[in-house]
Amino acid sequence: MKIKNEIIRNKTVINCYNTPENIAKNIIKRTNTKSITTPQHRNKSFEEIAKAQIEALDKVKLFANILEENRVKVLNIHTSEQKDGNVEKNKSLY
């Protein structure tokens, strides 16, 4: 997919991600401690939430790939890893 150059020129996108299981745990934890639940997570089991996160992460990865194909730099940050590891992995961006 081709994107107009002037829209994306000199841009970097930060993609923060985690495992579907960790995201689901955080959603359930937030629901239990703060009683905050978004409609798509309400009355869902851990497995249902994790499955939905797999689909969401796949869509984000596809979008990031399209951006990279159009010469947009994508900084991928795995939020459960140590900061130093993420820095090392992404030094090639600059």
Image (cartoon, rainbow, N blue to C red):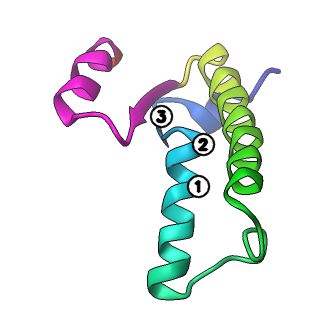
Q: Is residue 91 above or below residue 5?
A: above
Mark 1: amino acid: Ala
Q: Is residue 11 above or below residue 45?
A: above
Q: Would residue 35 be visible to someone looking at this image?
A: yes
Identify the residue shown where x is 52% and y is 57%.
25
Q: CA distance from mark 2 to mark 1?
A: 6 Å
Q: Which of the marked residues, 2 or 3, is nearer the chain's N terminus?
A: 3
Q: Quadrant of the N terminus?
A: top right
Q: Is residue 79 magenta?
A: yes
Q: Quadrant of the C terminus?
A: top left
Q: Is 22 left or right of 82, judged from the image as shown?
A: right
Q: Secondary structure at mark 2?
A: helix
Q: Secondary structure at mark 3?
A: loop
Q: Would residue 94 be visible to someone looking at this image?
A: no
Q: Disc 1 vs disc 3: which is toward the camera?
A: 1
Q: Residues within 10 Å of mark 2 (few under 14, many from 20)?
A: many
Q: Can you name the residue that lies furthest to the bottom here?
A: 35
Q: Residues within 10 Å of mark 1 (few under 14, many from 20)?
A: many
Q: Which residue is mark 1?
A: 24
Rendered image quadrant of residue 85: top left
Q: Which residue is mark 2?
A: 20
Q: Is 18 left or right of 20, judged from the image as shown?
A: left
Identify the residue shown where x is 78% and y is 69%.
40
Q: Mark 1 and mark 2 in contact (Cβ < 8 Å)?
A: yes
From the top left corner, tell me how far across and down residue 92 is, in percent: 31, 11
Q: Nearer the viewer, residue 5 or 91?
A: 91
Q: Which residue is mark 3?
A: 11
What segment carries the magenta color? 73-92
From the top left corner, tell me how far across and down residue 64 is, in percent: 62, 29
Q: Is 94 left or right of 22, judged from the image as shown?
A: left
